[in-house]
Amino acid sequence: MTARAFLLNIGSIVVLLLFLALWQFASVSDLVSRVFLPPVTDAFDALWRQVEDGSLLQAILGTTGRMLVGFAFAVVVGCGFGLLIGLSPTVRAYIEPSLEFLRPLPASAIIPVAILMLGLTKTMIIFVIAFGSLWPILLATIQGVKSVEPRLFEMARTMELSSREVITSIVLPSAVPDIFAGVRLGLTVSLILAVITEMMSAEVGLGANILHAARSFNSPDLFAGVITLGLLGLVINAIMETAQRHLTRWQQDY
Amino acid sequence: MLRALVLPVSLLLLWEFVGQSGLIQSDMMSYPSAVAAAGAGALLDGSMLKATQQTIVSALIGLLIGGGIGIALGAWFGMSDAANRLGRVSVEAVRPIPSVALIPLAMLVFGFGYGMTIAVVAFACIWPALIITQTAVKQVPRELLEVARGLELGWVRKLFTIVLPDVVPNLFTALRLAAGVALIVAVTVEITANPQGLGYALIVAQETLHPDRMFAYLIWVGLIGWLLNFGLLQAQRRLFTRWDIA
């Protein structure tokens, strides 16, 4: 690292601290009403209180638990059907146009449908998360499988590979970058859906916490919740980036 | 083309048949002809258009604010390496916050109404605009930047005469992607908390047990999203045929 880069990195942290100082000043001096913007220190105090009494952990576990269950369904179904649809040009001709039409539909728009059918239940939440995060994964898997180099299939035929071998040694490796991009997007969607579904139902979680805090004009708790969700997003991103690098490592050799 | 229609048409027919036959007796059951009638009704009495207008206006203003901030920051970070590095930690601290996490905050600050949706939409639109603009500005050919240096242009003129004209197609891509995000987020805010627009109409139809109207709104939302995407793609092809579109 050059001296300049080092200084800029330090400077970058200083800039963030300056923003936090500005926030603190704006709030303490009542430049912005404390009802909307609590002092930074109050927000972190609230966060710490939630850590100590265990309510934060409970909320995180509730939100991420539902998120991961729904997401797992989406990965299995999305990758499975994506493979089936992507491998067959005939099936694709029948299904793909309908899927393209559904693509821009907001995932949250199915929440009313799900509530009508399943009520305000945990099943509804899991269904919404699974259904919503399914689309990016499914479409990306189809895309990835579709764009496998055709000559690789010809080669597989001459080598008389079984269809299982074709999938594991040809299709999957070459489709992994696409599939992973979809899975990553799906995970983002599942976090969003987990947060809003619990705002609408009574489940314990981060989304329900911040909505409750806003309704009772408790801005320190509200900001503590937003900070937690930001950190959660950060952790998820970091995990996915590491996994992505790991899974596509072989490509970087070319 | 014909094969594309087989699946949706047969699903619709099956749905119509099951619904009409009364095989499933339920408050949530509806069928396509009832949905079409409910949709036509909502369209004619003006309620659907009013809700559409509320959603589109929120999404559009949020897009302009958020997209504007994103493009400005992206251009700045793309042109100045120092600014990019200095801002990095702050941007990375805010960016991972899911936009929906700001719904309660926006509700607290703005109350119900346009402001609340606009604020959340704007936040969500910043990031795609920022990233695409920054990447595009960084890829402006070095020769052009050297011309700017040779002519001793100030940064304002460099931005408007050299950098922006080169990245116009990318800015359009940024706006197109952000527009998709804007519509999705606007509907989501309305479904979750804000009593106006298409999202709220969906929730009201569900709560009052009007599945036909609910499905009509659902299809309408899908149609608007699809038209938006399709229209902007076509516009991009028309406008920028001379540029290479990545």
Image (tube, rainbow, N blue to C red):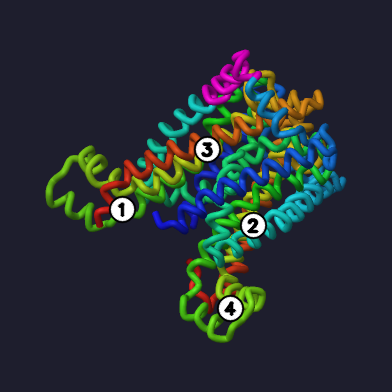
Quarter placement of the N terminus of chain A: bottom left
Q: Residue flagged by tag 1: what amino acid is it?
A: Val
Query: Closer to the N terminus: mark 1 or mark 3?
Result: 1
Q: Residue tagged by mark 3?
A: A234
Mark 1 falls within which chain? A
Q: Position of residue B86 (x, y in %)?
A: 56, 54
Q: Residue tagged by mark 1?
A: A148
Where B58 falls versus B204 (above or below)? below
Same chain? Circles 3 and 4: no
- Tag 1 near tag 2, CB within 8 Å: no
Mark 4 falls within which chain? B
Q: Residue flagged by tag 4: what amino acid is it?
A: Ile
Say whether residue A247 is left or right of residue A191: left
Magenta stretch: give its range.
A49-66
Give the crowd class for mark 4: few <14, some 14-19, many >=20 residues within 10 Å.
some
Quote the CA–CA distance across marks 2 and 3: 20 Å
Q: Which residue is drawn at 35% across and 48% down?
A: A145
Quote the CA–CA distance across marks 3 and 4: 36 Å
SS assignment at label 4? helix
Q: Residue tagged by mark 4?
A: B162
Q: Is the magenta stretch mostly helix, strand or loop?
A: helix
Quote the CA–CA distance across marks 2 and 4: 19 Å
Q: Position of residue A215 (x, y in %)?
A: 80, 26
Q: Specify the farthest residue to the left.
A: A159
Q: Which of A15 and A220 is in front in this view?
A: A15
Q: Which residue is drawn at 43% across and 52% down?
A: A93
